[in-house]
Image (cartoon, rainbow, N blue to C red):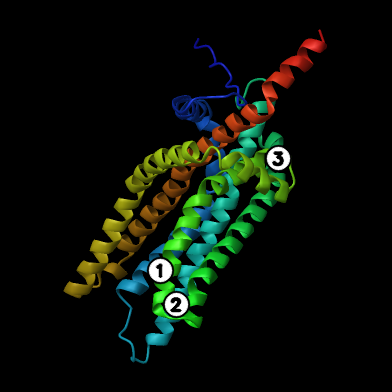
Amino acid sequence: MESPAPKINFYRERTFGEKLNTTFDYLRHSWRPLLRYSLYFILPLCLVQAFFLNQLMSNTFIDFPVAGESSFSNVISRVLAHAVGVYCCYIAGYILLSALLYSLMQTYERREGGLRGVTFDELRAPLGRLVGRSVRVLLFGLLLSLLVGAFIGLPALLGSLWTLLATIPVTLLLVLLFISPLWLFAPLYLLGDRPFFASFRQAFRWGMPAWFEIFGLMLVFGLIGSIVNMVTYLPWYLFTFIGQLFSYTEGNGMADTLWFQLTSYILGIIQSYGYYLSQVIAMTGIAFEYFHLHEKHEGVSAATDIASFSKL
């Protein structure tokens, strides 16, 4: 019988390559419970998200009228409603996925056998706590996005086009400067025990000196995640786009047939679920960057070893 894999020690200083390897080692050890519980929590959301995606594609490609036509305002309102529906699904998906992923990591660290045989009752408490924390992180991110949008848009309204052209590069430079600490903030707040704003300050204290390693790590995992996402995205996009185009040019109504809509809907579910799975890689990788920085600055494992030795 195959012996169980050794448990991964989260809080440990690691090189860039070790973080990459440890991230995939953890995902390889934990893919079964992660897949099972993501199917429970994320797949039902994907059923709704696929509906909005297909309706959005249909309204923008087939039913979209020319400005001035009587039906223009009705189609615009439907497109906006479906776009808002997709956006709300992405928001709910981020909240559920981040809470689920990090509650599994907390449970893995706490249990002697990792996630082997883990039950929902063991996940209930950390999952409920992290959902609330994930909501706060998301709302804070939306607020920052609105502030950035206002910083770009107000000069155009109050000034001139040249003011807007000068504001955009400055905004992009500021976003690039602060992007690494902001990436670090979510796992630091969700996995740590600090209050919200204390976690935000800590993310900048740890994240700015480690800017290049965080950015490089997220760049690598982002590229890998985009490949995973493309594998599930392209079949849905090509089937739906080509089918809608063929139906529009030939006028045969193929897009209205049951088989086309059902196939497009199933591919949309796969595409939506694949998108969330592609985010797991980067979210896990930045968590191991947090563990590395936590150990580097506060020595969690050393304190644990001293405490264990004092009990002998």
> Callout 2: few (<14), some (14-19), or many (20+) C-alpha neighbours within 10 Å?
some
Q: Residue at x 53, y 69 (%)?
A: 151
Q: Residue at x 18, y 73 (%)?
A: 249
Q: Which mark is residue 55?
A: 1
For marks 3 and 2, the one nearer the N-term is 2
Q: Residue at x 46, y 62 (%)?
A: 170
Residue of label 3? 126
Where residue 125 sits: x, y (%)? Answer: 73, 40
Q: CA distance from mark 1 to mark 3?
A: 36 Å
Do the CB atoms of the residues marked 1 and 2 lie less than 8 Å apart? yes
Rendered image quadrant of residue 168: bottom left
Which quadrant does the C terminus fall into? top right
Q: Amino acid at mark 2?
A: Arg
Where residue 11 sits: x, y (%)? Answer: 62, 26
Do the CB atoms of the residues marked 3 and 2 lie less than 8 Å apart? no
Q: Secondary structure at mark 3?
A: helix
Where residue 145 sits: x, y (%)? Answer: 54, 63
Q: Which mark is residue 78?
A: 2
Where residue 45 sits: x, y (%)? Answer: 53, 55
**In the picture shown, does residue 50 fall above or below 36?**
below
Q: Amino acid at mark 1?
A: Gln
The number of callouts visible is 3
For marks 1 and 2, the one nearer the N-term is 1
